[in-house]
Image: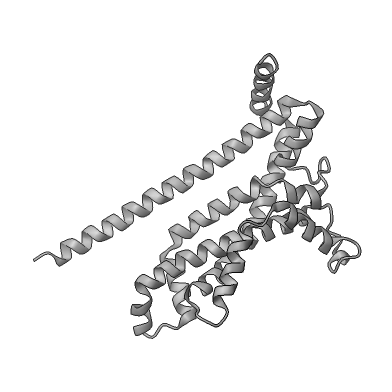
Amino acid sequence: MSTLYPSFVTALQLIASFDPALWSIVGRSLAVSTTACAISFGAGLALGAWLGVARFRGRGALLLLLNTLLALPSVVVGLLVYLLLSRSGPLGWLGWLFSFQAMVLAQAVLVLPVVTALTRQTVEDAERAYGEQLQSLGAGRMLRSLLLAWDTRLALFTVLVAAFGRAISEVGAVMIVGGNIDGFTRVMTTAIALETSKGDLPLALALGLVLLGVVLVLNGLITMLRFWREQAEGGALRAAAVEAAP
């Protein structure tokens, strides 16, 4: 208790004084996770929307694999990306190991199954509700996937926010492929682990508070999106009921 209180006070002072070391780590974390989510969300949105309406042989096995990848440990992702980017690996010629790009790649690989699986479920639910109607109007699978993805855009934005939260709170993969190099590849989660082991509790606690703040903001966004979605759906139902009333 005697260590916690002064460490907490110092941590708040570091945050309030805009300590350069602290906020450079925060900025790097946000940059890595934002870039990784932009890449994985684009690919996962397209693949998930297509899987939501497509029906083909082997789809069940593919979905089983996709759902299995949701629980893929981050250290395993880090190991696979490390092997790909190592000097003897197939992508070693890129020279990305222990760099910003390597961390982006690791987080993108980690988040891609999350975006794809959640998008697929969202679009498939919409397909059950509106798919036959769209098909009767002549919409093919690709067009239906695009229309349904647009119709469920609020839910898909929630998927994006959840994916960002998964990426920014990850530690294992970026530790392996980034190397936690000060000033280059050190992000919030790896810095917290390092500073705690060194005994620099104020900096570790300050980074932890900032990370909790980011997660709190993300959860707030998800809550607001759900509220807006419920309000929009409720308004549409009330409008339909008024129109149907004699």
Counting labels gives 0
* Colour convention of the picture: one colour
Residue 171 shown left or right of residue 215 in the figure = right
Residue at (55, 82) in percent of width and height: 57
Quarter assignment of residue 44: bottom right
Residue 242 is situated, as x and y percent measured from the top left of the image, at 16, 61
Residue 26 vertical placement versus 163 (above, below)? above
Residue 107 is situated, as x and y percent measured from the top left of the image, at 69, 55
Residue at (68, 49) in percent of width and height: 31
Residue at (59, 73) in percent of width and height: 62
Camera-side residue of 152 and 61? 61
Residue 130 shown left or right of residue 42 in the figure = left
Pick out the residue farthest to the top. 2
Residue at (66, 16) in percent of width and height: 1
Q: Is residue 41 visible?
A: no
Residue 98 is situated, as x and y percent measured from the top left of the image, at 84, 52
